Image (spheres, rainbow, N blue to C red):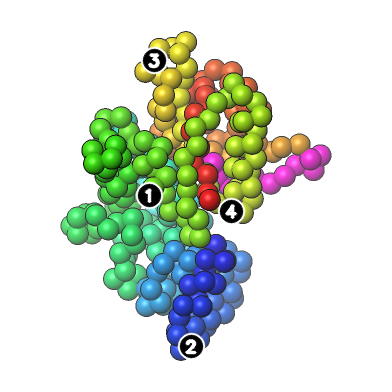
Amino acid sequence: MAAAAARARDGLGPADRGRYDALCALAAQGGPAVAGVPVRALAAGAPLRAIEALAARWPSLSPRDRAQVGAPLGGGRPGPLHLAGAPVRQTDATTCGSAVLGALAAAGNPLLALWLVTGDLAGGHRPPELRHAPPAALASGDAAARFATLQRALQGASTRRALGPVGWPRALGTPPWGAARVARWPGVRFRAHLLDDTDGPHLDAALDRADAALAAGVPVPLFTGGDLGTGLTTAVPRHVVLLVPGVRPTDDGTHPGYAVLEPGQGRVHRVGRDRLAAPGGPHPALGGWSHVCWVLLPA
């Protein structure tokens, strides 16, 4: 994130670099969480006028709204996750992937988070995730409606041309490769990787890469499903969850497990790495499914 912001800063003219540096100095007075807000906004591609508008809006935000704009994923704490009182939850049975992509994007872009929490488009800037959203929907009056608008926009983007020139049937949710194409986090691109949890070394290598991403602060989307024992239709990706940064290493050096946002209930769960490596039946962190089957890893 810092590297992406530094590259964006290098592309500014001298006067604009001075304006941006002044915003960072002002934000630093609010502590580490606030100090990262202009950095994340610039890294996410926001124009300077929008970052200045966010800084002007900041003093009027409630403490709750500031916390949610600064950390939409709640720091990985277990329990229900809300934005402005609305659950961070999928709107229907087909939008788990869109809900995860929306939570991922909001965590990386405070201007998108600001719109979700308050309805404000700072400086008139429309975040790229909302490019295809109808203008009337951008003025939705409540956070739940705004999150639904974001999900619909991301579902359209991730299913469009998912099979070459042909769109992916929305009834089947979000295909992993379509999700990878539209997943947004400043400074990285995502690639979809098929997982085989019967191959221990293969799965360990994938989870090691997920651990490295989480340690760098990058959330990781994970597709879950069943197996042939419950029928062919369950042995394919059926649900999407989000591995969330925030779980700290244990003192004894053992793996601390993962914080997982499950969008069906809008809750953050904890699950051990050993549980992902050795499926033992349905698990709430996996949306009631038993296996991990695809992962989106940053490249």
Mark-to-mark CA distance, 4 and 2: 30 Å
Three-letter code, disc 2: Pro
Label 2 sits on residue = 14
Label 3 sits on residue = 232
Three-letter code, disc 1: Val
Task: Please say if the residues under marks 3 and 1 sit with CB atoms less than 8 Å apart.
Answer: no
Residue occupying image coordinates x 42% and y 49% = 183
11, 58: nearer the viewer:
11
Three-letter code, disc 3: Leu
Quadrant occupied by the N terminus: bottom right
Determine whether the residue tagged by mark 1 lies in a helix, strand or loop.
helix
**Residue 45 at what x, y percent from top left?**
41, 67
Three-letter code, disc 4: Gly
Mark-to-mark CA distance, 2 and 3: 60 Å
- Crowding at mark 4 (Cα within 10 Å: few <14, some 14-19, many 20+): some
Q: Residue furthest bottom?
A: 15
Mark-to-mark CA distance, 1 and 4: 19 Å
Q: Can see residue 107?
A: no
Is residue 82 shown in magenta? no
> Which residues lie in the magenta part?
242-253
Determine whether the residue tagged by mark 2 lies in a helix, strand or loop.
helix
Q: Is residue 39 left or right of residue 123?
A: right
Magenta stretch, overall SS:
loop
Which label number is shown at residue 182? 1
- Crowding at mark 3 (Cα within 10 Å: few <14, some 14-19, many 20+): few
Upstream in sequence: badge 2 or badge 3: 2
Residue occupying image coordinates x 34% and y 62% = 127
Upstream in sequence: badge 4 or badge 2: 2
Which label number is shown at residue 217? 4
**Residue 184 at what x, y percent from top left?**
43, 53
Residue occupying image coordinates x 60% and y 37% = 206
